[in-house]
Image (spheres, rainbow, N blue to C red):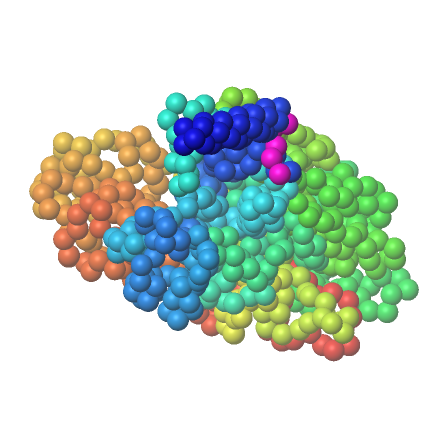
Amino acid sequence: MKLKRKNVGAGILMVVFTVLFFVLTSKFFLVASSQSAEGVDLIEYGKRKWMKSDVLDAKRGTMFDRNGEVIAQDIPSYSVIAILDKKYPNHIKDPEEAAEKLTKVLDSDKEDLEELLSKEGRFQVEIPSGRKVSYRKKEQIEKMKIPGVDFLRESRRYYPNQSFAAHVLGYTGNGEEGVQTGLMGLEKSLDKYLKEKDGKISFVGDAFSRAIPANKESITPPKHGQDVYLTLDEKIQLYLDEAVQEAAKKYKPEKITGIVADPKTGRILAMSNSPSFNPNKKDIKNYTNFAVSYPFEPGSTMKIFTLAAAIEEGKYNGNEVFQSGSYKLPNIGRPIYDHNKRGWGPITYNEGVQNSSNVAFSKLVREKLGYEKYRSYLSKFGLDQKTNIDLPNEKSGSILYNYEIEKVTTAFGQGTTITPIQQIQAATAIANGGKMMRPYVIDKIMDPETKKTVLSNEPKVAGKPISEETAKQVRDILETVVTDGTGKPYMIDGYSVAGKTGTAQIVGKDGKYISGWGENVFSFLGMAPKDDPKLLVYVAVERPKVEFPEMGSTPVANIFTSVMKSGLQYLNIQPEVKVNDKSSKVKKSYGKELPDYTGQSAEKAKSDLEKLGMQVSVIGSGNEIINQEPYEGAYVMKGERVILRTSGDAKMPDVKDWSYMDILRISKLLGLKETITGSGFAVKQSIKPGNPVKEGDFFVVQLEPPKVTETDAEEENVEETGSTEEPSEDEDLPVTD
């Protein structure tokens, strides 16, 4: 009986197990065939559970200057994260201690940070003040060895020269999905070329996102942005930026803009504005690139193009005499006045150009050229339309040419408005044998991986408003403006400069011209060397804070002469020597070629150089020359400084009254890391005279322009603005240089 009960029980169990087997088998086949259970897609669930992915960072396109120097690039940055999940091996164990340590490096409130690190139910958190920190800060945090603190590697946009051409380059910000997007300048207008697209890698991983060996990875490679090569020259741009910043600091004007161009090609070598900003910090107070987006009354720089039109039409006789001072137009109540109101008596038209006579140019347009013919030249010079430079937000000025008085005042730069870049384009015709070159800043765009050129720009002739002979004649006359006229502050030792000053009035909110000392736009448009211009420079300074006897044109002259001379010397343009003969005509000849003095006696070399009229500085305790500046074969002119480095220890000389280029030369010769502030000549130095120096030392030098005496200022003021008195209240017609 007992055995029988056992057999029955065994039979029941067998039946149960058989049924269960068939149920489970059926379920298995059902799940296998449907790939789902309880309405859950098992394939997708597995992917979510075990398939891991990571981002492959792409790099935004790099910007280079014309010599291949990096001026905008992506660099690694790191975001600080804290792992809070206690199941993870490396997590935050003591929030209070971690917060205390992190606040020593990051700009965070300790209590707020401790609260963040104590959150429950979170796997990890990102530290707000730890986003995109530098590698240096990352190292500082790593040395603290805080459990649970880790880093996400990212990239950020970096501009190595800080405020370098800030309004040209612009800046970036976070766009969709955290991808960098251009928000201003070329970063914005070229965003479709520069923008990157991150890649992705997918793999099977464990709970801690560690890849399981022998599993295939799926990779979508990143697409890097394309590289942009600009026409800007890093050195010349730095010269301009520094000069503009120094003038802004000292004179606190409303605005400054400066442009340096290659007149033979239209390439923009430098462009700077003030107020400016540092795109790394985005401390932006001014979003406008004045060089291309700010039309204003140019003042007497406009006379360059009026003169060129008259010469081209055969209507200009420089030796013809006219009565300066004032010019009465029919049916116009008040006459046109020269900027000094009284004029200079009967003078020639050449003298009228040198003295920037408004009467001379009014007569040229009204009596010689004719209004319609002159208007056609405004179009030929492109002054009534955009230049189409490849920079965003370019604006065009407005030619005020409805009434006779407007047609006359346009001839000397009042009423009509134009932009600095329009003046630069027009002036290339004067500097380039009559061929007017379209300005541009983008040289080429290249794919960094294939090295294929995506976009390329070449010099383009925008028109030929005048002949080569006319261009030469205009340059010859404009040189006398600098040697004998209102442009004397713009003379540069060793180089012939052709150019024209401008002092324009500013319309106030009440519609009337503002009056007062320094309440003008002061400008200069010049080129050098005169016979074959290599650089074309325009500088404008609006309402500098100057007090009598200092001139409003002083900051303009400081910027122009500093940038032009440094630029020409950087380009190794041979200097010229000017010698006045009995007829007071200017003769030019190249300077002397400097021989190689290495290995020679310092005493003899110094004696020989001083006989040639050079300033000689010998550095070193020995007598044998081991190096020199300038280098062998460089052209030097009488009065220029030559620095000889001898064997033995070097001691710093007294560099007071040394020029900018002299400071660069001694820094190069001794291997110093120089920082030069200001413009003009040295007044202070960080390494005292007589102190020993070695390669790698930091050398800071402050420059200042020569002091202007009250007598000098009064004389210059008569040349530039005509009077130290304010204009009379009843005078509506312009008094402009």
Viewer-proximal residue among 2 and 530: 2
* Residue 679 in the image, given as x and y percentages of width and height: 41, 57
Res. 313 image quadrant? top right
**Residue range (magenta):** 34-38
- Residue farthest to the right? 331
Left or right, 623 with respect to 421, comes to left
Q: Residue at x 57, y 62 (%)?
A: 285
Q: Residue at x 89, y 62 (%)?
A: 330
* Residue 549 in the image, given as x and y percentages of width and height: 50, 72
Viewer-proximal residue among 736 and 50: 50
User: How many labels were placed on the picture?
Assistant: 0
Left or right, 210 with respect to 57, comes to left
Res. 69 image quadrant? top left
* Residue 626 in the image, given as x and y percentages of width and height: 16, 35
Q: Quadrant where the C terminus lies?
A: bottom right
* Residue 55 in the image, given as x and y percentages of width and height: 49, 37
Q: Residue at x 18, y 38 (%)?
A: 605
Viewer-proximal residue among 500 and 356: 500
- Residue 351 in sight in this render: no
Q: Is residue 190 above or below residue 350?
A: above
Assess whether residue 120 is covered by the magenta stretch.
Answer: no
Q: Residue at x 62, y 27 (%)?
A: 30
Q: Quadrant where the N terminus lies?
A: top left
- Residue farthest to the bottom? 729
Q: Is residue 420 above or below residue 551?
A: above
Left or right, 535 with respect to 105, comes to right
